[in-house]
Amino acid sequence: MTEIIIDSYLCSGCATCAEMCPQVFRMDPVSEKAELIRVNPPVTDDVYQAAAFCPEKCIEIKE
Ligand code: SF4
C-alpha cells in the first residue's frame, strides 16, 4: 500500500501542501507543522504534486 510520510523535523510550516492538497494535508495549529488529515489517505496526483512542491522535500511517498 502507498504510504505518505511527513518528516515533521524538516517541515518548515510553509503550508504549501495544505494549500495544494487540503483533502490530505493540514497544518497542526499547535506545532505549526503539516500533518495528514487521516490515516492512509488516497494518494492522488495532487499528493505527488504537493510533495514535489514542498520546499523542504519532507513529504515522502512510499510505494
Ligand atoms: S510543503 Fe513541506 S515544508 Fe511546507 S508545510 Fe508542507 S510538509 Fe511542511
Image: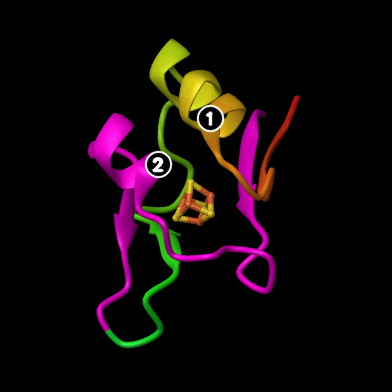
Q: Is residue 6 magenta?
A: yes
Q: Is residue 43 above or below residue 18?
A: above
Instruction: Determine whether label 1 and label 2 are within 8 Å by CB.
Output: yes
Looking at the rendering, which quadrant does residue 45 occupy?
top left
Element type at mark 2: helix
Residue that numbered label 2 is attached to: 17
Residue nearer the viewer, 42 or 47: 47
- Left or right, 32 with respect to 5, comes to left
Within 10 Å of disc 2 (Cα), the crowding (few <14, some 14-19, many 20+) is: many
Which quadrant: the C terminus? top right
Whether the residue under disc 1 has CB within 8 Å of ligand 1: yes
Q: Is residue 24 above or below residue 46?
A: below
Q: Residue furthest top?
A: 45
Count of residue discs: 2
Q: Amino acid at mark 1?
A: Phe
Counting from the top left corner in percent of width and height, residue 28 is at 32, 73
Counting from the top left corner in percent of width and height, residue 37 is at 31, 54
> In this orientation, does residue 21 appear?
no
> What residue lies at 49% left-to-right and 20% top-to-bottom?
49
Q: Which residues are magenta?
A: 1-29
Looking at the rendering, which quadrant does residue 55 occupy?
top right
- Left or right, 1 with respect to 16, comes to right
Counting from the top left corner in percent of width and height, residue 9 is at 68, 74
Residue that numbered label 1 is attached to: 53
Which of discs 1 and 2 lies nearer the camera? The answer is: 1
Which quadrant: the N terminus? top right
User: Residue 7, which numbered label?
Assistant: none
Whether the residue under disc 2 has CB within 8 Å of ligand 1: yes
Q: Residue furthest bottom?
A: 30
> What residue lies at 44% left-to-right and 70% top-to-bottom?
33
